[in-house]
Image: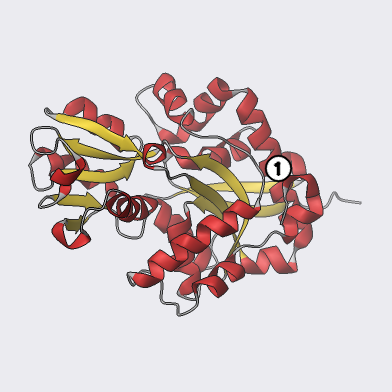
Amino acid sequence: MAAQAKKKVVVAVAPSVDMSSLIVAVKKGFLEKQGLDPQLKIFDSSPQAVQVLVAGQGDITQNTEPPHLAARARGGKVVQVLTAYLSGRTNGAINRTDLIAKHEDFAGKTVGVQRGSGAHYHLAWFLDRYKIPPDKVAIKFMAAPDQIAALARNDIQAFFSWEPFLTRAAGTIPNTKLWSRAVDDGLEFHGNVLMREELARTDPDTAGRIVTGLIETADWMQANMREAARVANEVLRAPSDEEAYQQLQNFKWPGDFRKSVYEGELKIAQWGASVGLFPTSDPKKLVEEIVYPAIVKAVAPNRTDM
Protein backbone atom coordinates (compact mmCIF):
# COMPACT_ATOMS: atom_id res chain seq x y z
CA MET A 1 0.00 0.00 0.00
CA ALA A 2 1.43 3.38 -0.98
CA ALA A 3 2.45 5.72 1.78
CA GLN A 4 -0.01 8.53 2.42
CA ALA A 5 1.03 11.76 0.69
CA LYS A 6 2.30 14.47 3.02
CA LYS A 7 -0.05 17.42 3.51
CA LYS A 8 1.22 20.51 1.71
CA VAL A 9 1.52 23.61 3.90
CA VAL A 10 2.28 26.99 2.28
CA VAL A 11 4.47 29.08 4.58
CA ALA A 12 4.33 32.76 3.58
CA VAL A 13 7.30 34.87 4.67
CA ALA A 14 9.12 38.10 3.87
CA PRO A 15 12.94 38.47 4.05
CA SER A 16 12.57 39.97 7.52
CA VAL A 17 14.28 38.75 10.70
CA ASP A 18 10.97 38.44 12.56
CA MET A 19 10.07 35.65 10.11
CA SER A 20 13.13 33.61 11.09
CA SER A 21 11.33 30.87 12.99
CA LEU A 22 9.13 30.05 9.98
CA ILE A 23 12.16 30.00 7.71
CA VAL A 24 14.04 27.73 10.10
CA ALA A 25 11.00 25.48 10.58
CA VAL A 26 11.01 24.77 6.85
CA LYS A 27 14.72 24.69 6.10
CA LYS A 28 15.75 22.62 9.13
CA GLY A 29 12.96 20.10 8.58
CA PHE A 30 10.89 20.67 11.71
CA LEU A 31 7.62 20.78 9.77
CA GLU A 32 8.62 17.92 7.50
CA LYS A 33 9.36 15.86 10.62
CA GLN A 34 5.68 16.25 11.50
CA GLY A 35 4.64 14.56 8.27
CA LEU A 36 4.05 17.80 6.36
CA ASP A 37 5.22 19.06 2.97
CA PRO A 38 6.12 22.70 3.70
CA GLN A 39 6.37 25.09 0.76
CA LEU A 40 8.26 28.32 1.57
CA LYS A 41 6.89 31.27 -0.39
CA ILE A 42 8.76 34.58 -0.16
CA PHE A 43 7.05 37.96 -0.57
CA ASP A 44 8.33 41.53 -0.50
CA SER A 45 6.71 42.44 2.81
CA SER A 46 4.93 41.02 5.83
CA PRO A 47 1.58 42.64 4.87
CA GLN A 48 1.77 40.88 1.50
CA ALA A 49 2.26 37.58 3.28
CA VAL A 50 -0.83 38.24 5.41
CA GLN A 51 -2.88 38.98 2.29
CA VAL A 52 -1.80 35.67 0.78
CA LEU A 53 -3.52 33.91 3.69
CA VAL A 54 -6.60 36.13 3.37
CA ALA A 55 -6.81 35.12 -0.30
CA GLY A 56 -6.61 31.44 0.65
CA GLN A 57 -3.28 30.99 -1.14
CA GLY A 58 -1.17 30.47 2.00
CA ASP A 59 -1.55 28.62 5.28
CA ILE A 60 0.66 30.33 7.87
CA THR A 61 2.66 33.49 8.36
CA GLN A 62 3.60 35.65 11.34
CA ASN A 63 3.79 39.31 12.28
CA THR A 64 3.09 41.81 15.02
CA GLU A 65 -0.48 42.45 16.09
CA PRO A 66 -1.65 45.43 13.95
CA PRO A 67 -1.50 43.80 10.48
CA HIS A 68 -3.25 40.68 11.80
CA LEU A 69 -6.02 42.68 13.45
CA ALA A 70 -6.50 44.80 10.34
CA ALA A 71 -6.86 41.71 8.16
CA ARG A 72 -9.39 40.12 10.50
CA ALA A 73 -11.36 43.35 10.90
CA ARG A 74 -11.70 43.59 7.12
CA GLY A 75 -13.18 40.11 6.91
CA GLY A 76 -10.04 38.01 6.53
CA LYS A 77 -10.66 34.48 7.78
CA VAL A 78 -7.45 34.17 9.78
CA VAL A 79 -6.62 33.32 13.41
CA GLN A 80 -3.55 33.52 15.64
CA VAL A 81 -2.47 30.17 17.03
CA LEU A 82 0.94 30.63 18.69
CA THR A 83 3.38 33.29 19.83
CA ALA A 84 6.48 32.98 17.68
CA TYR A 85 8.53 35.72 19.32
CA LEU A 86 8.65 38.47 21.90
CA SER A 87 10.68 41.58 21.28
CA GLY A 88 11.04 45.05 22.66
CA ARG A 89 14.30 45.55 20.78
CA THR A 90 13.64 45.01 17.09
CA ASN A 91 11.37 48.07 16.90
CA GLY A 92 12.72 51.54 17.62
CA ALA A 93 13.08 55.18 16.69
CA ILE A 94 15.82 56.89 14.67
CA ASN A 95 16.36 60.66 14.78
CA ARG A 96 18.48 63.44 13.35
CA THR A 97 20.72 64.49 16.26
CA ASP A 98 21.18 68.00 14.89
CA LEU A 99 17.42 68.60 15.01
CA ILE A 100 16.16 66.46 17.91
CA ALA A 101 17.95 66.44 21.25
CA LYS A 102 15.10 65.83 23.72
CA HIS A 103 11.61 64.39 23.64
CA GLU A 104 9.98 67.80 23.29
CA ASP A 105 11.93 68.37 20.06
CA PHE A 106 9.76 65.83 18.24
CA ALA A 107 7.05 68.50 18.24
CA GLY A 108 7.15 70.42 14.98
CA LYS A 109 9.03 67.63 13.16
CA THR A 110 8.02 65.22 10.43
CA VAL A 111 8.21 61.57 11.46
CA GLY A 112 8.08 58.64 9.05
CA VAL A 113 6.37 55.34 9.82
CA GLN A 114 4.73 52.46 7.95
CA ARG A 115 0.99 52.80 8.44
CA GLY A 116 -0.70 50.01 10.35
CA SER A 117 2.55 48.41 11.50
CA GLY A 118 3.85 47.67 14.97
CA ALA A 119 6.09 50.71 14.49
CA HIS A 120 2.96 52.84 14.00
CA TYR A 121 1.68 51.64 17.37
CA HIS A 122 5.10 52.33 18.92
CA LEU A 123 4.93 55.92 17.62
CA ALA A 124 1.47 56.42 19.14
CA TRP A 125 2.66 54.86 22.40
CA PHE A 126 5.77 57.06 22.38
CA LEU A 127 3.82 60.31 21.89
CA ASP A 128 1.42 59.41 24.69
CA ARG A 129 4.14 58.27 27.09
CA TYR A 130 6.18 61.44 26.73
CA LYS A 131 3.21 63.82 26.55
CA ILE A 132 4.02 65.02 23.03
CA PRO A 133 0.83 66.44 21.45
CA PRO A 134 0.05 64.24 18.41
CA ASP A 135 -1.24 67.23 16.47
CA LYS A 136 2.19 68.86 16.80
CA VAL A 137 3.91 66.02 14.93
CA ALA A 138 3.57 65.62 11.16
CA ILE A 139 3.33 61.89 10.47
CA LYS A 140 4.39 60.78 7.00
CA PHE A 141 3.35 57.25 6.09
CA MET A 142 5.85 55.32 3.98
CA ALA A 143 7.17 51.80 3.54
CA ALA A 144 9.95 50.90 5.96
CA PRO A 145 12.70 50.56 3.29
CA ASP A 146 11.98 54.09 2.03
CA GLN A 147 12.52 55.73 5.42
CA ILE A 148 16.31 55.71 5.31
CA ALA A 149 16.52 57.73 2.08
CA ALA A 150 13.80 60.10 3.32
CA LEU A 151 15.77 60.76 6.52
CA ALA A 152 18.97 61.36 4.54
CA ARG A 153 17.15 63.95 2.39
CA ASN A 154 15.68 65.56 5.53
CA ASP A 155 12.17 64.89 4.20
CA ILE A 156 11.64 63.46 7.66
CA GLN A 157 13.59 64.19 10.83
CA ALA A 158 12.92 60.87 12.54
CA PHE A 159 11.31 57.53 11.83
CA PHE A 160 9.84 54.62 13.76
CA SER A 161 10.65 51.24 12.25
CA TRP A 162 12.38 47.93 12.92
CA GLU A 163 15.60 46.09 12.23
CA PRO A 164 17.59 46.02 10.03
CA PHE A 165 16.52 49.55 9.04
CA LEU A 166 17.36 51.03 12.45
CA THR A 167 20.96 49.84 12.42
CA ARG A 168 21.45 50.68 8.74
CA ALA A 169 20.21 54.24 9.18
CA ALA A 170 22.30 54.89 12.28
CA GLY A 171 25.36 53.46 10.53
CA THR A 172 25.08 55.30 7.22
CA ILE A 173 23.44 58.73 7.70
CA PRO A 174 25.47 61.53 9.34
CA ASN A 175 24.02 63.16 12.46
CA THR A 176 21.72 60.20 13.01
CA LYS A 177 21.33 57.89 15.99
CA LEU A 178 19.07 55.29 17.52
CA TRP A 179 16.88 57.35 19.83
CA SER A 180 15.29 54.40 21.62
CA ARG A 181 14.09 50.86 21.22
CA ALA A 182 10.53 49.91 22.09
CA VAL A 183 11.61 48.31 25.35
CA ASP A 184 13.20 51.62 26.42
CA ASP A 185 9.74 53.14 26.05
CA GLY A 186 8.07 50.36 28.08
CA LEU A 187 6.72 48.40 25.10
CA GLU A 188 7.12 44.78 24.00
CA PHE A 189 5.57 43.20 20.92
CA HIS A 190 4.22 39.69 20.42
CA GLY A 191 4.85 38.21 17.00
CA ASN A 192 2.10 35.67 16.49
CA VAL A 193 1.69 32.84 14.02
CA LEU A 194 -1.29 33.54 11.76
CA MET A 195 -3.16 30.60 10.22
CA ARG A 196 -6.01 30.31 7.75
CA GLU A 197 -9.12 29.91 9.88
CA GLU A 198 -10.49 27.08 7.77
CA LEU A 199 -7.31 25.08 8.30
CA ALA A 200 -7.27 25.82 12.04
CA ARG A 201 -10.89 24.85 12.64
CA THR A 202 -11.58 22.07 10.13
CA ASP A 203 -8.24 20.25 9.98
CA PRO A 204 -7.03 20.08 13.59
CA ASP A 205 -4.62 17.24 12.78
CA THR A 206 -2.65 19.29 10.25
CA ALA A 207 -2.94 22.42 12.38
CA GLY A 208 -1.64 20.51 15.38
CA ARG A 209 1.31 19.18 13.41
CA ILE A 210 2.19 22.72 12.32
CA VAL A 211 2.03 24.09 15.86
CA THR A 212 4.05 21.16 17.22
CA GLY A 213 6.72 21.72 14.58
CA LEU A 214 6.89 25.43 15.36
CA ILE A 215 7.22 24.79 19.09
CA GLU A 216 10.13 22.42 18.41
CA THR A 217 11.64 25.06 16.13
CA ALA A 218 11.43 27.71 18.87
CA ASP A 219 13.13 25.47 21.41
CA TRP A 220 15.90 24.58 18.96
CA MET A 221 16.47 28.22 18.02
CA GLN A 222 16.85 29.30 21.63
CA ALA A 223 19.61 26.72 22.07
CA ASN A 224 21.25 27.15 18.64
CA MET A 225 21.04 30.85 17.81
CA ARG A 226 24.11 31.05 15.58
CA GLU A 227 23.05 28.09 13.46
CA ALA A 228 19.52 29.49 13.32
CA ALA A 229 20.95 32.79 12.03
CA ARG A 230 22.93 30.98 9.34
CA VAL A 231 19.86 29.06 8.17
CA ALA A 232 17.54 32.08 8.28
CA ASN A 233 20.06 34.20 6.41
CA GLU A 234 19.58 32.02 3.33
CA VAL A 235 16.37 34.03 2.94
CA LEU A 236 17.14 37.20 4.92
CA ARG A 237 20.23 37.98 2.82
CA ALA A 238 21.85 40.10 5.54
CA PRO A 239 25.41 41.19 4.62
CA SER A 240 26.75 38.44 6.86
CA ASP A 241 25.57 35.60 9.07
CA GLU A 242 27.04 37.56 11.98
CA GLU A 243 24.70 40.48 11.30
CA ALA A 244 21.77 38.07 11.10
CA TYR A 245 22.87 36.61 14.44
CA GLN A 246 23.01 40.07 16.03
CA GLN A 247 19.49 40.78 14.77
CA LEU A 248 18.15 37.47 16.07
CA GLN A 249 19.35 38.32 19.55
CA ASN A 250 16.77 41.10 19.68
CA PHE A 251 14.13 38.38 20.00
CA LYS A 252 13.00 35.71 22.43
CA TRP A 253 11.42 32.67 20.78
CA PRO A 254 9.00 31.22 23.38
CA GLY A 255 6.78 28.98 21.24
CA ASP A 256 3.84 29.42 23.61
CA PHE A 257 0.48 31.20 23.82
CA ARG A 258 -0.21 33.12 27.03
CA LYS A 259 -2.96 35.36 28.39
CA SER A 260 -0.66 38.34 27.96
CA VAL A 261 -1.24 37.97 24.19
CA TYR A 262 -4.91 38.78 24.63
CA GLU A 263 -4.31 41.61 27.09
CA GLY A 264 -1.72 43.37 24.93
CA GLU A 265 -3.65 42.83 21.72
CA LEU A 266 -6.79 44.36 23.17
CA LYS A 267 -4.91 47.62 23.80
CA ILE A 268 -3.64 47.63 20.22
CA ALA A 269 -7.12 46.86 18.86
CA GLN A 270 -8.60 49.74 20.84
CA TRP A 271 -5.91 52.08 19.51
CA GLY A 272 -6.36 50.87 15.93
CA ALA A 273 -10.11 51.35 16.09
CA SER A 274 -9.71 54.84 17.55
CA VAL A 275 -7.50 56.02 14.67
CA GLY A 276 -9.43 54.26 11.92
CA LEU A 277 -6.98 51.44 11.17
CA PHE A 278 -9.43 48.68 12.03
CA PRO A 279 -13.04 48.93 10.85
CA THR A 280 -14.62 47.64 14.04
CA SER A 281 -16.95 49.04 16.66
CA ASP A 282 -16.04 46.25 19.10
CA PRO A 283 -12.26 45.81 19.59
CA LYS A 284 -12.82 43.22 22.32
CA LYS A 285 -14.85 41.01 19.99
CA LEU A 286 -12.23 41.42 17.27
CA VAL A 287 -9.50 40.13 19.58
CA GLU A 288 -11.68 37.27 20.82
CA GLU A 289 -12.26 36.23 17.20
CA ILE A 290 -8.61 36.22 16.17
CA VAL A 291 -6.94 34.69 19.25
CA TYR A 292 -7.41 30.92 18.87
CA PRO A 293 -5.69 28.83 21.56
CA ALA A 294 -7.52 25.56 20.85
CA ILE A 295 -4.65 24.06 18.84
CA VAL A 296 -1.90 24.68 21.34
CA LYS A 297 -4.21 23.49 24.13
CA ALA A 298 -4.59 20.20 22.28
CA VAL A 299 -0.95 19.54 21.37
CA ALA A 300 1.04 21.34 24.10
CA PRO A 301 -1.20 22.31 27.05
CA ASN A 302 1.86 23.21 29.13
CA ARG A 303 2.55 26.04 26.65
CA THR A 304 -0.63 28.00 27.37
CA ASP A 305 -2.60 29.39 30.31
CA MET A 306 -5.60 30.44 28.22
Count of numbered circles in the view: 1
Which corner quadrant holds the C terminus?
Answer: bottom right
Report x, y in % for residue 55: 50, 68
Where 283 sits versus 100, above or below? below
Residue name at image x 72 percent, y 50 percent: 304
Where 204 sits versus 218, above or below? below
Q: Looking at this view, is 46 or 296 the one in front?
A: 296
Q: Looking at this view, is 275 or 240 the one in front?
A: 275
Q: Looking at this view, is 110 or 229 the one in front?
A: 110
Report x, y in % for residue 47: 41, 57
Residue furthest to the right: 1
Q: Secondary structure at mark 1?
A: helix
Residue name at image x 35 percent, y 50 percent: 122
Q: Is residue 29 visible?
A: no
Q: Is residue 7 visible?
A: yes
Name the kind of residue labelled 1 in the image. Gly
Report x, y in % for residue 280: 45, 77
Residue furthest to the front: 131
Where 230 sits versus 10, above or below? above
Q: Quadrant of residue 145?
A: top left
Report x, y in % for residue 103: 20, 42
Residue name at image x 69 percent, y 50 percent: 210
Residue name at image x 36 percent, y 69 percent: 277
Q: Looking at this view, is 8 or 178 the one in front?
A: 178
Residue density around tag 1, few if under 14, some if 14–19, many if 20 or more, within 10 Å:
many
User: Disc 1 marks which residue?
Assistant: 213
| Horizontal arrangement in the rendering, residue 302 relative to residue 237 (left or right) | right
